[in-house]
Image (cartoon, helix red, strand yellow):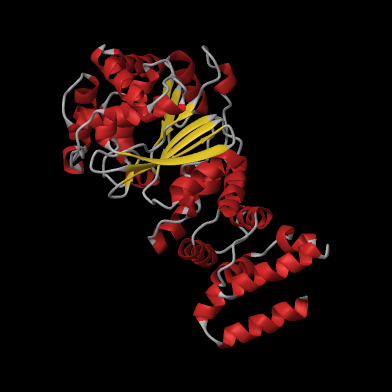
Amino acid sequence: MWFLKRGLRAFFLLDGVSLRRNVLPFTMRVENLFLVAGGLRNYSIIHKKMDIKSAIQYVVDGFDLSEPQMISVMNKILDGQVTDSQIGSFLTALSIKGESVHEIVGAAKVVRSKVPSFELAANIDGGPVFMDILSAGAAGTGSFTVAISTAFVVSASGVPIITNGYREALLQDTAVDVLEALGLDISLSIDFIEKCMKGVGVAFFPSFLSCAVIRQLIKPCREIAIRTIFDILELLVNPAGATTFFLGVVDKRLTGILAEVLMRLGERRCLVAWGEGNVGGMTLSGTSRVADGFDGKLRCYTIAPEDVGLERSTMKLVRGTGTIEAAEQVRRVLRGGRGAELDMVLLNSGAVLLAAGKVESLKEGVITARKIVESSAACNKLTELAAFCKVQK
């Protein structure tokens, strides 16, 4: 069968990039079907180790890497065996082709193995439910206040919460500045994070790129200046061993893909949301697409603000324009301030409560979140964490 592959490859290469990208992958799939049917498929076709140059060419030709191939390439990248220019070429080629489920799963497994972890899920009082809400409502809006506020609302419901800053937050210190303006000490110490989780039930940790092994990738990622698979991995690194996820993505295509990835990584429940206008998470400005992975099944649906009793609003009313204003916006929301700022937090909080199993529907989640805010429990949780940080200094 090798002569068929080589002959077809030579023919289609003569006919240009379009045929090479679109027809050749099809012929590869046909060839693989013949091999499988005849029991001749070589295990190494999918499971062989791959060097970076071969990986770049493979992806440029329009092929998806298998999970073992991606693991091999990612290990070489993170072990410093690959140049910055090769990293940039590989990440760009992946981005143009579109990252597959197998590629993301393989990369996530390697990154998770490299980043220091702290298993807290089984040690939290009140049960094993653990959440990682990450950049809910933040990505694409220029505001991290939604994710920060959501963390306190959900934590006040009794769900242990851990969240980190989006990648740009690490590079620009935006989220860290807002948290510090709220009186919170954002320490790099895992011990400190563990104390926050056990003492208060909510904690914020820096981006996984703060890990020395991963931080080496900041330079090539900055230079190519496009979103890459590492922006996706930011959402999946999970150093705290979370079992339930609510992720906000700015690429609609990734909703179903990331939900499937999380299920393959063994997570208990996941909700991945994209908001109209490329808002990372649920949005008030239009419909939100949600991929809900639970018990091995994936369900996708759309939600409009009116479906859960909220009014549509523009994102301009949600964005903060500076660190001080953003911190004040968080305080205002947690104190029960009315309007789009609060509604955006209620919408995302409702989704997190649904993922955590606290409610049966998103509408019930929004109602529950509103009651939490009106009871001052969310505001008290912020005060409690600030006081805890002050004592720990």
Q: Position of residue 51 (x, y in %)?
A: 66, 64
Image location of residue 69, percent across then percent down = 67, 58
Q: Quadrant of residue 31?
A: bottom right
- Judging depth in this view, the residue of 192 and 221 nearest the camera is 221
In this view, 30 is above or below 376:
below
The N terminus, quarter of image: bottom right
Q: Answer above or below: position of 353 versus 107.
A: above
In the figure, is residue 285 to the left or right of 359?
A: left
Q: Position of residue 164 (x, y in %)?
A: 41, 35
Q: Image quarter for residue 114?
A: top right
Q: Quadrant of the C terminus?
A: top left
Q: Furthest-bottom residue in view?
A: 14
Asked whether residue 123 appears in the rendered view, the answer is yes
Q: Residue at x 63, y 56 (%)?
A: 70
**Vertical arrangement, residue 55 with respect to residue 290, above or below:** below
Which residue sits at x=66%, y=70%? 28
Q: Position of residue 155 (x, y in %)?
A: 39, 20
* Residue 178, visible in the rendered structure: no
Q: Is residue 99 above or below residue 121?
A: below
State the residue in front, 293 or 143.
Answer: 293
Please give the count of numbered marks on the rendered protein.
0
What residue is shown at x 73% (from left), y 57% (from top)? 47
Q: Residue at x 78, y 66 (%)?
A: 35
